[in-house]
Image (spheres, coloured by chain):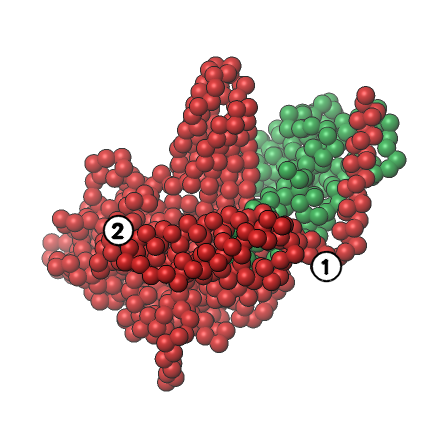
Chain colours: A red, B green
Amino acid sequence: MLLDIFDPKAPPKPIGIDLGTTHSVLAYVRDERPLAVTTCDGGPLLPSVVHYGEHGQVIVGRSAVSHLETEPERTLASVKRFMGRGWGDPQLARLGTYRFVEPRTDEEAKVVRFDLGGESRTPIEVSAEILRSLVQSASEQLRAVGGAVITVPAYFDDAQRQATRDAARIAGLEVLRLINEPTAAALAYGLESRREGTFAIYDLGGGTFDITLLRLEDGVFQVKSTGGDSALGGDDMDRALAERMLAAMGFDEPRNAPKPVIALVLSAARDAKHRLTDAESAQLTLPKRGGGDVPFTISRADFDTLIAPLLERTGKAARRALRDAQLQASELDGVILVGGATRVPYVRRYVAELFGRPPLADIDPDLVVAYGAALQADQLSHDRGDTLLLDVLPLSLGVETMGGAVDRILPRNTTIPVGAKATFTTYADNQTGFELHIVQGERELARDCRSLAHFTLKGIPPLPAGQARLEVSFHVDENSLLRVHARELSTGVEQSVEVKPSYGLTDEQVEEMLIDALDHGEDDFERRRLAEARVEASRLLLATDKALAADGDLLDASERQAVPEHADRLRRALAEDSADIGALASRVQALSQTLDAATHAWAGRRMDRAFHAALAGRDVSQVAGSVEHARGVEAHLAEHQKDAT
Amino acid sequence: MAHPFEILGLAPSFALDPSVLEQRQRELNRALHPDRHAGKSPGERRQALSRAMDINLAYRTLRDPASRAEALFELLGAGSTRESTISDPVLLMEMMEQREALEEARRADDRTQLDAIGRSMAEREQVVLGRLSEAFAPLLTGSPSPAAALREAQLARARQLLAELRYVRRFAEEIAAFEDD
């Protein structure tokens, strides 16, 4: 066995985490190759199961799984299905062992809470426990854990992504990026084999299905389209089989069976599914309702029939993704399988038929996503990387208009980051406020889409209907997080909101959970804030020094004086120590902001330089041609205006 | 704000090679995507983010032929065409017949017929795209400038073709949506 030599000054290791429905994996990169960390269970896979003991102890992983049958109420599995979901979500009605806390207020209804008997937990907190356990194992093996790339299903909406981020924050992780699971898998394959071409990634996990079409060229991974179902996975196969078993046991209404029975049968179904991967049939003995046993046999053919409707749903999503990407299945260079459920033989046959070629599965489908995340974390934190991920918006973003219809501002499968604007007007005379309802989804009516946020632009001067011009801008950053900005054009009244999903935690709630999670609460929190401010400030100073060396010639006279001055003040503050940790943290943050503001205009000039360098890089002739052409159009327009007068 | 062709450093044209467009978007993202500036100051990352946002919107606009045509009209100072409808009676009649055929195939759940209509629409789309390229070409050459009346006629022709393109695509989408069910 190779032993790492302990180096106290070793930089923190960036990590990639696949936070899965059934199990989670943490990986890192060593010598340019991804490796999975051994979890507390002794292998790379940590079952995503958390048990909350009567006396406050929290158990994660395989030991928690053993509590699933004995204490199903205090043991939570597959919580990923509930991320970003609120009370009343159809997910809550499915066959399972969960008990939910009935909300007393609208505020409480925004986040699902599991009832543990006397206490409750949100899916976000449960996910944070899983993350914490993984990071604990990583810290033991890597000493210092750095920033994390966490994967999410491509089809996760804004609320589900936000919930994942919140979980990471509560677990004390610095999130470098959330990336989509299929993209991560493609990254692992692409970097492994240096292949180029167009690939389909078919990702059937425990609870989610994603299909992604992606082109890899010149080191750029460009997602062409993505689709899927964030509530479809291997779990559904277990559930379909479990329902059949419960019927055989004498429960006509499977949903009404006692929770421990459901837990037992779900586990038996999962086991039978695994056996059917190699065997032609599986026999088992089930307890009969009211006493006695009943033999139960399922053949692989029966199982295939049972899961066929689930696979049809994946086929439909795949066909739509192909159409969105304007591709034919025959144009693909390969199909990649991801997710444990793709081990089912019928899934492989189905995929082969769907795309007309046998799929690739040479990297372990359970580890490939974490590997890709680790590679991306490595790239992002070392700022070298010759690869770039260009992902897309999974679901259209829009605004509800009069009559409850949706005006789509950014259609699905638009490359991100991206910004777009649309203009609306008032529909009533003297309307002084404008309510905006932001939704995500493909349906025609706003009430069928996911509601992301409501906000009101107030203070519009009274005008006749249709006179006010309301400009709404949507900005989706590289993390797929949305910001909406609204402005009334005739008066300049404006308002900006960071879209906090309607279903989610507030910043205060997250902060509280974070403080609760730390050993010494408030005190630790301030200490951590100072540490983060210092890291951020050192990063800023380093970046400024580099920029001065490379593009100092782009500074104007006043900046030439101001930038080094602000940098020095920040440098001095960094060297300080103070008993009042909170005040020092705030000062470092303020000085960082001042330096950042002073370099703003200069940064713009540096980007211009980068833009021209990029154009000049490949085909100078075409650029020159386009400039000449653009001039031609202007001259043309000038002449046209002359003609018109 | 700069027009999408300028943002991508491309010559305005309707007959845009998709692979050239894609390559340009890739190159500019390589230079300006915020991930390429991960270690830089927040100010620079913001700048990079805003450039990348513009680049990707411009790419989105130019990739779709209908919005590309719309962008060209804007560039030519010819206003929006969103409201324009088809006025050619022959074409209108043909469209109505196609629609009836679609309804009938849908009622009968006749997949072969649906496929045939879908294919004929796809062919038609290619024809309209070719005509649009021809219609825009003289409008976009810098010189010599045509007389105002001629230019108006050229613009009107392009507008009609764009309305037809939109119609054909909506039709194709309906067929696709039906095939999804």
Q: How many marks?
A: 2
The x, y position of residue A251, in whole percent, is 19, 49
The x, y position of residue B26, in whole percent, is 63, 55
* Kind of element beneath mark 2: helix
Given the current orientation, which residue lies at the most extreme right position? B144
**What is the three-letter code of the residue carrying label 1?**
Arg
Dividing the picture into quarters, in which one does residue B128 lie?
top right
Which residue corresponds to the image point at 81% horizontal and 28% vertical from the top-left? A640
Residue in front for this viewpoint, A622 or B120: A622
Where does label 1 land, which residue? A618
Q: Is residue B158 above or below residue B111?
A: above
Which residue corresponds to the image point at 47% horizontal and 38% vertical from the top-left? A484
* Label 2, residues with CA under 10 Å away: few <14, some 14-19, many ≥20: some
Q: Chain of mark 1?
A: A
* Kind of element beneath mark 1: helix
Residue A414 visible, this angle: no
Which residue corresponds to the image point at 70% horizontal and 44% vertical from the top-left? B6
The disc placed on residue A241 is: none
Distance, label 2 to label 1, CA atoms, is 51 Å
Q: Chain of mark 2?
A: A
Where does label 2 land, which residue? A513
In the rendered image, the quadrant that contains the N terminus of chain A is bottom left
